[in-house]
Each structure stands twice: as C-alpha cells, then as structure tokens.
Amino acid sequence: MNTNGPMLGPDEIERAANRLEGSPPEATLTWALQTFGARVSLASSFGAEDMCLLDMLCALTDKPRVFYLDTGLLFPETYTLIERCRERYGLQAIRLTPLLTVEEQAETLGPELWKRAPDRCCGIRKVEPLTHFLRTEAAWITGIRRDQTPARARARVVEPDEKFGLVKINPLVRWTHEDVWGYIRTRDVPYNPLHERGYPSIGCWPCTAPVLAGEDPRSGRWQGMDKTECGLHQ
Ligand code: SF4
C-alpha cells in the first residue's frame, strides 16, 4: 500500500475521470502535473504509446519524471531507444531494477524461470520493483488503451489503482493504433525499430515474439501461455 496515500478521494477521481474523458491526452497530462506535481511519474516501456506520452510530457515540463523497469532482459533495440531519448529530450529516466540479477535468479530458482513460472518471474523482475517505487508516488501515468485487450476496455482516464494504492492516469485510453502512429509520424517521435519487424508490443526478449499482420497485437507476448499481463495492470 502506498504509504503516502492518494491525494484524491474516490469522488474527486470520478469527477476528474468524467471531466477528462473527452479531452486530448495533453489536457490530462496538464491536469496530472498540476494536481500531483513531483509525485506523478510516467511508466515507460518505450513502446509506441509511451513514446507519444513522453513527447507530450516533455513539451509540458522540463522536469518530466519517467521510470522504466530494467528487467535485464530487454531487447538491445530498447536500450538503444532509451539512449536516443536521452539525446532527443535530455531524458534522465529512473531505472528500476529487480533485487536479483538474471544470473542470480538462475542460480536461486533455476535457469529460464520465464519458461516454467512466468508469473513468478514477472513478480520478481517487474512487480516487486514497481511496488517499491510506487510507495512514494501519488499517481502514475500509463500508456494503456481500451482497444488493446478486453481487460483494458474498462480503463478510465483517471482511476484509483487499488493494487498499488495510488491514482492511475491513462491519457491514451480512447486512442487507437492509428492515433498513436499518426502522432509519431507527425511529431517525428523516435520509436523502437522492432515495431517495423512485426513486434507491436515489446517487453522482455524471452517473452516477446513477432505477430502476423491482422493478429491480436498483444498475441506475441507470452506465446503459448495462459498469460496476457505482467501483473502491473489490473
Ligand atoms: S516478461 Fe518474461 S522475462 Fe520478463 S519478467 Fe515477465 S516472465 Fe520474466
């Protein structure tokens, strides 16, 4: 549970969600910065949606707070993109790491845990570091969109995050895939080149495969397993 607690009550969150539902993402980000100041941060996996939000955030503030989960298993292209963000935006992203390195995890729990127990692996490499970080935040911003998965279809622009005990802000909930790529092209936003090689959704390399045109964009994640989320989103 977030020890600082959300600064907004359920009624205020509901009012904000209703008011911002039809607003452009930039208006939601402006509200987030005004409401939470230095206690709101963007969660970035440096996917296409997160790159749009990063670009918007950097236009609104010269001190964007952006964090990412460095599982130690990201694609080389993702690490290169993080470097490009440093050059383009002067971004000093907050790097969250698991308690165990990949090698230590293999020594303790056996090699390639992601093949045998992906929920445990995501728990160690993603959920634990995120939980620890969010304890001192009042709100976090994510790039989830309603049309990505059935579970995400219910996401609000602003909602209470019961799991982590703070406010969750989803400025792109109403956006489509086309909206995302329209923004990237118009603003010449840098993006992960893997998107052009059949990877619409990019996570850790052991659990991300390319998908064919027309397939569910997230079907390349944890292929062959009964798993669709890392455990970060409810
Ligand atoms: S996505 Fe795969 S490799 Fe990455 S933390 Fe989850 S199970 Fe482990």
Image: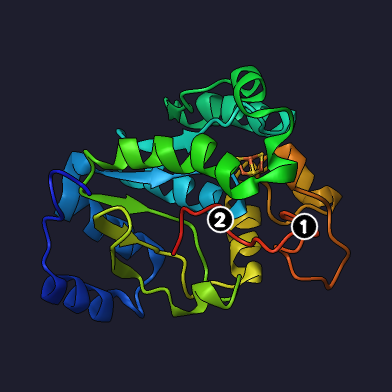
What's the residue type where badge 1 is placed?
Answer: Gly
Task: Say which element carries label 2.
Answer: helix
Neighbours of disc 1 within 10 Å: few (<14), some (14-19), many (20+)? many
135 with respect to 148 (left or right): left
The vertical placement of 3 against 223, above or below, is above
Mark 2 and mark 1 lie on one chain; the one further toward the N terminus is 2
Q: Quadrant of residue 194?
A: top right
Disc ID at residue 26: none
Name the image quarter holding the C terminus.
bottom left
Identify whether 151 is placed above or below 55. Answer: below
Q: Is residue 23 left or right of residue 209?
A: left
Ligand 1's quadrant: top right
Q: Which mark is residue 220?
A: 1
Nearest to viewer (mark 2 / mark 1): 1
Q: Residue at x 85, y 48 (%)?
A: 197
| Ligand 1 lies under 8 Å from the Cβ of mark 1 | no
Q: Is residue 64 visible?
A: no
Instruction: Rate crowding at label 2 as few (under 14), some (14 to 19) or many (20 or more) other CA atoms within 10 Å.
Output: many
Viewer-closest of 216 and 131: 131
Q: On the rendered structure, is 180 left or right of 6?
A: right
Q: Which residue is mark 2?
A: 49
